[in-house]
Image (tube, grey):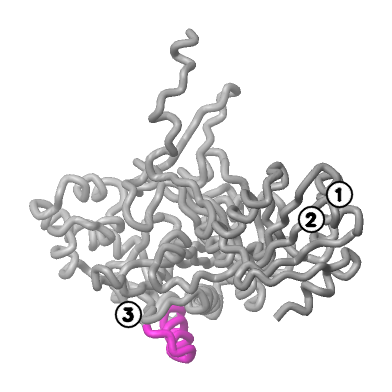
Amino acid sequence: MSNENKKINKESLNSLKGMRDIVDEQYYQFQGFFEKAQEIAVYYGFKPIDTPILEHEAVFTSSIGEGTDIVDKEMYTLKTKGGDHLALRPEHTAGLMRSYIEHGMQSLPQPLLFYSYGPTFRHDNPQKGRYRQFYQFDVDVLGSEKSILDALVIKTAWTILEEAGAKNLSVDINSIGDKTCRSGYIRELTNFYKKNISFLPAIDRERLKTNPLRILDSKEEKTIELNQNAPDTLSHLCPDCKKHFKEVLEYLEKMEIPYNINKCLVRGLSYYTRTVIEIMIDDEETGKKITIAGGGRYDYLARQLGSKKDVPSVGIAIGVDRVVEAPWFAKLSPRIIKKPKMYFIQLGFDAKLKSLNVIEILRKGKVPIAQSISKDNLGAQLAVAEKLGMHYAIIFGQKEAMENSVIFRDMTNRSQDTVKLESLLEYIKNLK
């Protein structure tokens, strides 16, 4: 490769389309949300798991299925030098189930409750609240078909969203049956679309060949209108699926969670069975309802990934980008890493020599600080402190270095005290 080709042009220095840097205040807001979500998940009995961002491509193609937008158009895939076909995860669930099978978790007391979070990737059309690298927070229960667990994941996600500031939430819910009753429904649905094929746009005609259920989830206006008369899944449920769905609705009513039975709700992934869920919220700008969390039951996913036995499971994922960017978001403050309120200033070489020791005293006392210890000028450092909106400044100069003290300045009223280093943490603790 020539040196000319190695040169980086201006465009290549920008972040990729649909991806962005998360910095400053927004970073803290993401962190605050994830901390709150973890805290609530733990109270409901979930424990953490973290699976790789990269998986074998087959983990997703065999589970999500052909005829879905994710597999057909949106997955980021690559081939390694060794010939392996890999994919960046477009969602968390398939990787979670792969981990469950790989580590023999079926031998543990069931069910297992997990929460997970982090970046996911889809080559989708970027729009408000939707990015090509986006963030999800998932809660999942693996190893039981009990209807109360469907209610548990809904309640956990609902509580997280309310604690994040969401109001006027509601649940869209449907049951798409299981292997006992779904095949008969799909036959009737397919016949309905074949009779009305002249009304179907090209994209939905293709779906008819590979995954007719996906047509119910179509965003095409003609198809949306046609779907109002499509056969509904609920009238085709077997007795077990009817009982399961009825119980889930009873749990929602008992928890006073408002719901709407949406006969066109199927979700975009082919591994779903029985319950499918979307948590909706009113978009203040458009007045329309938008999906902010979604999921459902995936009782057959384990077998699709090679397990000899089914692992009945249910989960839900929250779209964190939409939460953090929403005007109603409570801008949750992080607690694990606190946003600094104090600015450390040093002056002169003797102070520089001891500066890191002073910072270590503050660290051990769990006092986060901002600093620019490479600078030497007092005015420049104070200017940075003011620009960052710091409440206090800790000034450590030549005189203070000799006397083992600091000057503690209140940035709002310019008052200041001289404080001995051994008393510094106690002084800070007593600040009002």
Q: Which mark is residue 354?
A: 1
Q: Which residues are magenta?
A: 244-258
Residue 126: image location, x then y, percent: 34, 48
Q: Is residue 249 magenta?
A: yes
At x 44% / y 90%, what residue is drawn?
A: 256
Are there few (<14), some (14-19), or many (20+) residues within 10 Å of tag 1?
Answer: some
Quadrant of the image for the C terminus?
Answer: bottom right
- Point out the residue furthest to the front here: 399
Q: Amino acid at mark 1?
A: Lys
Whether residue 349 sits left or right of residue 296 in the image: it is right
Q: Nearer the viewer, mark 2 or mark 1?
A: 2
Q: Earlier in the sequence, mark 2 or mark 1?
A: 1
Question: Which residue type does callout 2 highlight?
Answer: Phe
* Magenta stretch encompasses residue 278: no
Label pair 3/1, CB-CB below 8 angstroms: no
Residue 384 or 149: which is nearer the viewer? Answer: 384
Q: For the residues marked 3 and 2, what is the alpha-carbon distance in whole angstroms? A: 62 Å
- Marks 2/1 in contact by CB < 8 Å: the verdict is yes
**Image quadrant in which you'd find residue 233:** bottom left
Q: What percent of the width, then of the height, locates residue 87?
A: 51, 39
**Residue 142 visible somewhere in the drawing:** no
> Quick one: 167 or 204, which is closer to the camera?
167
Question: Disc 2 marks which residue?
Answer: 396
Q: Give whichever of 413, 231 is nearer the camera.
A: 413
Residue occupying image coordinates x 17% and y 69%: 228
